[in-house]
Amino acid sequence: MNLDVLKDQPRLLLKASLKPLQGTRFQPTGFPDLGAATYDGPDGRKMLLVESAQSMANRLEKVCWNEVNDDWADPLKGLPVVKVKDNAGNSLTNSVLEAHRLNSPYIVNAEGFDAIMGAIGYDRNKPFDRRKLAKALLQYDPNSLLHGVFMEKIGGVVRLPRTITAFIEAEDVTVAAYGGAKHDRVRQSKDSEQEGRTSKEGFGNLIYHKDDYCGKITAYFNLDLALIRGLGLGEAAEKLLVALALFKIQHFFAEGLRLRAACDLEALDNGVTIQRPSKFDLPEIKKLDDALPTLIHKVYGEGDAVTTVIWDGAKAGAKTLEGLPEPQIPENLKKVVKWKNASKKSPAKLEIKVQDDLSPEQLAEQLYPGDDGAKAREKFLTVWNSDAEGGDAQENEEGQP
């Protein structure tokens, strides 16, 4: 497997023509309130987004993980991963499968995350060193180096963009609009509605419509080689990341093309086309599977690459707010709100265990009451909302049926 052709290239661009495994119709990604993502192309052709970059990131990650064994696929064993367990030692999730990877609330709020945060090295009073972030990701979750991460819960600048981006489009699309019916064999009459037994509860007859699409389908992949080299991780790590990205692409075509029940695809006979660089040959699956264990060993050696954090739901969900005046903590909030005075090492903090039955506005009213607390309430809500912002790069898989 020769990756030397890619040494001085800024991008590796690939595409593949796809078709439905059976018939001509397919169901694209969509949302209940938006429907399918149709649009007009630059030349006026009817276009359709079949699968978004966010969803494709999830699918490329999925082919790497053996959910039955709760471990990497065999060629990838030895790669670092953060596993989340509960207090009883039961596995809950991990950084490969979580939509926001290391920024998952089940990781950043877990016991044991402090070591990861220390390796990232964010200091709000100093310029942020993204190379230090890259080294921390290589140590704990190299998957985030490929699919990006935005750790706004630590700081708004703690982020890396994707190095691999993929999406699927269709062109010259037409719509196959059809419908269906669900029949109630017990209570078919509308009298049921008078008794509160409506279609919302699953009663009565229900008529519905669906739209499938037909068109020329193409999958696109963009691997940012310049960005990988710019992380400053060294040649061995760069080769590993490139090979891991190619592993994801090849295994996606081999086992990941059933996007939905009504969107089961296959690649056309010409397979994957290299758009640039033209002299590069995409390694076959077997060559990638055989090469990756050696590449992983060169970077990580024989050490244990699993980091375990403990998610305790009773302790999670706390917020730490800085830059606020000291509040008046009423008796009913003393178990969930704590004020910490400033020290030489850290500013004053307001620690709050988030309560489902209290909105931020209600908290502000109780902590800073009366007319005298108006400005403090306003600042409290500003800090609260800025702390809650985040996540523009790693969306969870769209609401696909």
Image: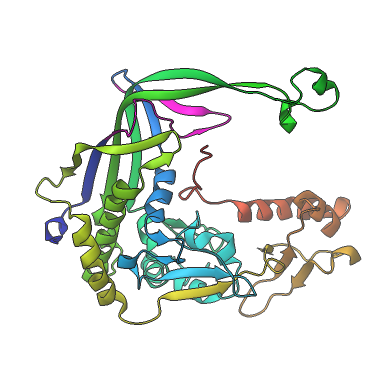
In which quadrant of the rendered view does residue 208 lie? top right
What is the number of callouts on the image?
Answer: 0
Left or right of 303 on screen, residue 288? left
Question: Quick check: can you spot residue 87?
Answer: yes
Residue 91 appears at what percent x and percent y? 56, 68
In which quadrant of the rendered view does residue 384 lie? bottom right
- Residue 36: within the magenta? yes
- For this rendering, which residue is in front, 208 or 121? 208
Residue beneath the point at 34% across and 49% down: 255
Q: Residue furthest front?
A: 185
Residue 362 appears at what percent x and percent y? 82, 51
Residue 317 appears at what percent x and percent y? 68, 62
Left or right of 140 on screen, residue 340? right
Above/below status of 353 relative to 148: below
Residue 256 appears at what percent x and percent y? 36, 47
In which quadrant of the rendered view does residue 63 lie? bottom left
Residue beneath the point at 37% across and 51% down: 60
Above/below status of 93 relative to 260: below
- For this rendering, which residue is in front, 54 or 194? 194
Residue beneath the point at 48% across and 23% down: 211
Question: Quick check: can you spot residue 227?
Answer: no
Residue beneath the point at 28% across and 67% down: 232
- Residue 226: within the magenta? no
Residue range in magenta is 18-42
Above/below status of 240 relative to 362: below
Above/below status of 88 relative to 244: below
